[in-house]
Amino acid sequence: MNSILLIIKSNLARRRSQSITAGVSIVTVSLLFSLSIGILTSIQQPFDKVFNNLNASHILLLYDFRNDNGDSMKNWFLKQPEVESVGNPDAYYNCNGPLFVKTGKIDALVQITEFTSNHLRQDKLKILKGDIKDAPGINEIWLPNYLAVQHNIQVGDTIAIPTSGGTYSFKVSAMVSDPHYGSGMVNPTRAWVKAGSLSFFAPVSQLTNNCLGIRLKSTDLVADVLGRFNTKFNFAGTALQYSIFKSAFMSTYQLIAGILLIFSILALIIAVYLIRSIIIKTIYDYYKLTGILKAQGFTPANIIVIYVTQYLFMAILFIALGCCGTSFILQLIMQSVMRTIGVIDLHLRLPFIFAVSFIFLTTIIVLTAFIAALKTTKIKPAQAIKYGAPERIKTRTRADNIINRSLLPLLPALSIRALMENKKRALVTFTVLLFTIFILLFSSGVTTSLSQLKYNKAAWGFENGEIELVRNGATPIGFTHQELKEIFEGEKGIKSVTPFSYESIMILPGAGKQPVNLFGKAYEGDITKAGLITLSGIYPSNESEIALCIGTAKLLGKMPGDSIAAFIEGQQVTLKITGVYQDISNMGQGFRLSSKTFEKLNPVYSPAMYSLKLVNVAGAEDYKKYLQKKYGSTITINMNIEDRLKQMGIVSNMIITFLLLAIFFITILLLSIWNDVIVSTRDYRKSFGIFKTAGFTPRQLRMLLVWKMILLCAFSLILAIPLSLFLSPLLMGQVTQNFGIVQFPFSVSGVSVIIIACIFFCAVVLCAWLSSSGASKINPRVLLVGQ
Amino acid sequence: MKPQILKTSALTKSFPGSNSAAPVINNLDTHFFKGEFTVIMGNSGSGKSTLLYLLSGLDKATSGKIWIDDFPVHNRTEKELALMRRQKVGFVFQDSNLVPNLTVKENILVAGRLVSKNSNQLNKRVDELLNDLGILPLANRMPGQLSGGEAQRCAMARALINDPVVIFADEPTGSLNSEASLKVMDCLDTIHSKGQSIVMVTHDLKSATYGDRILFFRDGQIVDERLRLGERGCAAEEEALFTWLKQKGW
Ligand SMILES: Nc1ncnc2c1ncn2[C@@H]1O[C@H](COP(=O)(O)OP(=O)(O)O)[C@@H](O)[C@H]1O
Ligand SMILES: [Mg+2]
């Protein structure tokens, strides 16, 4: 055993650059892998922690007190055994128009809620920035921290709120952590003002909205309680629940962790290849030594132990390094997450994360080493000592006419022969090239798809209208639905109008299953007119039909053709499912109905939202101004989805993430090309000497190596471009299916594919060229006997 | 007097890293004649291989001048040297040094394609050469499937493919048994009889007797030379050469 350790030591020292290459790749793999596991396992913690610290409600009921009686609901909840506590109904004002701050306007739907003393007990708020006070003061407002961060609002700024009588200004006095509205993924959001101050700026007739919070003893009781509630009450408002708050908060981080996991698996495959080829290379380099060892009485098992132990050492050392990196980066990520949400202490399950990474990665690395080392058993001592290399009688290959005929120039022809000669190494390099270009194209495709969203809205689940607006029916001079619709139909600039409304219904899935509270939309007229498409089936055209979002359809286990029972406007109806669609805006949950359903059940129903398709798409911004000017406060134009995304920084964050990953993978690629070229130069130094003697110029010698990369690179591009077009949507579909997108609306831009392919190609060729300089410095003495 | 094909003037080569202060080639003035078969002999490590590398433009001299066929080899860039080599120089080593993943024929074609653009003509020329050297049936074999002598003759065909001005051979029979050596030397003799200039380094007395003129190299200098008197490869000539070499300190 002692002698084995000695050999390992000398192996590591003598093959330093290769050990470093293997080490770097192991470190990266373990970093990516443990980081993604770390994020996946830790991200729900801060949320739950803050949720519990603040005694947050698992259920929020938003309702109009003219339709639902808050006190009787409260009393009913108090009697349920699962309920821990129930808050008081809080009055809130739905602020539909944009808020104005010094940095511009905020196009979010904000519920301005009164902060009562009840919030010192349940649904507490944690003040992250600003004066620590029990409640906001007069003319002060508390904002959720993420909103402040997103819009760069500071404590002390003023914020102006549109009211029916002009704007009303508040001073921002604190940023709070509000677990119900913890992320920009959910609209509306909530802001807090002093109790009783709503009536300062809103007429009492508009202050009919209330919010009631119910905190349960455990999170998994939500469905039970809500189910019973719905059978007992004809609740006409909206019930928000724990799972929505949580998934909204976690979705972004899960997406990041998912992508990291995909990349770490790709990196693992590269590392396995690298380790395998390094071991095989070492075996050939030490061919003679191995023969001598065998002659001295080492058994094949002893020799395998040498390699396996060596890589076991390396795995332990480098995975540990990677895990150190993870513990550092994970702390940073989680701390920034915690800061936005306001948790102070966090228990990261580092030992668990590290144990999983260690066991998984070490097993794979040691197994790779073992399989690669099995080769040594085939070494015959006598032959090894005599020749110092495996005796390889080369037989003719199929490409043998390539040099005889002058179809190809000499250098590429020779390179093809060299590739055929060492197919395995060519395959490894080819695979690394393929992976890298695939990842680049994949990243660019995903980013393009996101940035092209506005041309492809229907596939993401949005109406294709350029303008979405709200009819402010409550204003004294407001229009009715019929009036406004006729006005829009008369506007020359508008091609089509699709009126719709946001609605919530309660699905009753049947015996033994919990009712499901759903948000969705009701459309007037033909739904497909708004550009919307289905995954299967069609959209409803009469009052007894419904289309479900894919997530809901899965949740209920329903397909087009099935029927479901639902509570709508306080009445139970049976609806036939006509189709299933995808929609990212509500985490894959939701429905689309014809407005006829609501008209039938509620005689005073009328839609208040309009999606307008314009004649001149490019002039949308000007047309918005025109409409706003012409119709003033009777309408509110919403920010469209592409601007909202831009504001949330999703696309730009994505681009930065992908850019970093691209740099990372290109670095690995360039390192392995460099390694390949250096190893090739050494392996073929005799051939280079011969070519030099025969009169190859230094440039031609280097080009022999470069041509190999040009060929491999060209092949990998030829394969990777169609492959990425085919696989990227499938991969992304896997990632986004939890967000309600099963068929990822993948779009590519030919220009960026070409640019990426060119940059990739140039980088590879340049790297190969720079690392090939050794080939031109070959000393002809290598050709002497015994050298 | 025969025209000179190769000459040097004050040629010096020293290796900066080596511990001995004396240059390996020391201020050497010498010349080689057109159509002559010149043999260089000397002790092991005296610098014969180094000299051949300098003469063939494979290595650069520390100082001094070299002309091949009136073409100045000194002060050239690597590229110019490479272009010169493919036209004017053929090289045969002790080891055949064939590219292992190319067939016999391809090994020769690779060198040929550097110069000739006409592939039909080139293919014909390769076949001709292989035939002359008696290895045409082996044209499509891989180097690993050849005997030492066959491989060496293939290396000679490669050296000859571009009709070089001069062929350098560094101990071409050094790794061969006497039978294979004889065949290789016969080939060299045939080439020489067609007017090819050859400069050969050897340790083997029998091979050395094929030379028209034998130079003795020591201490970085050609210290003496001897013209062949008797028959090629005959025992008497071998004997006489041996006595001469011993006198020079071989
Ligand atoms: N690159 C080099 N660096 C240092 N010394 C060298 C180098 N190449 C050759 N030598 C030395 O030059 C001397 C002559 O070598 P060589 O020409 O191969 O001798 P020969 O061919 O006569 O046996 C030797 O002593 C050798 O060690
Ligand atoms: Mg020598």
Image (cartoon, coloured by chain):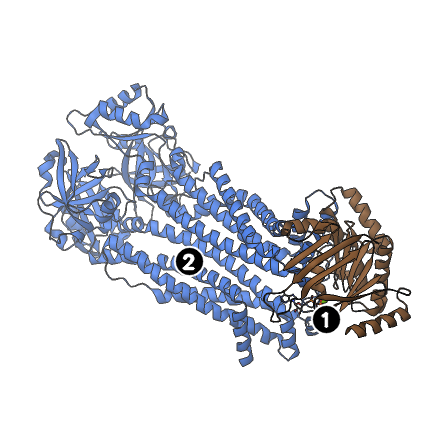
Q: CA distance from mark 1 to mark 2?
A: 59 Å
Q: Nearer the viewer, residue A684 or A365?
A: A684
For the C terminus of chain B, the quadrant is bottom right
User: Which disc is residue B155 wearing?
Assistant: none
Q: Position of residue A722 (x, y in %)?
A: 54, 42
Q: Are marks 1 and 2 in contact (CB under 8 Å)?
A: no
Question: Which amino acid lies under the numbered mark 2 shown in the image of this protein?
Answer: Leu
Amino acid carrying mark 1 in the image: Ser
Chain B is shown in which shade? brown
Residue displayed at 79% across by 49% down: B163
Q: Chain of mark 2?
A: A
Q: Nearer the viewer, mark 1 or mark 2?
A: 1
Q: Which chain is blue?
A: A
Give the percent coordinates (x, y) of residue A734: 44, 48
Question: Is the residue marked 2 within 8 Å of ligand 1, measured from its CB?
Answer: no
In the picture provided, is A416 more to the left or to the right than B153? Answer: left
Query: What element does badge 1 sit on?
Result: loop
**Residue under numbered circle 2:** A32
Mark carried by residue B44: 1
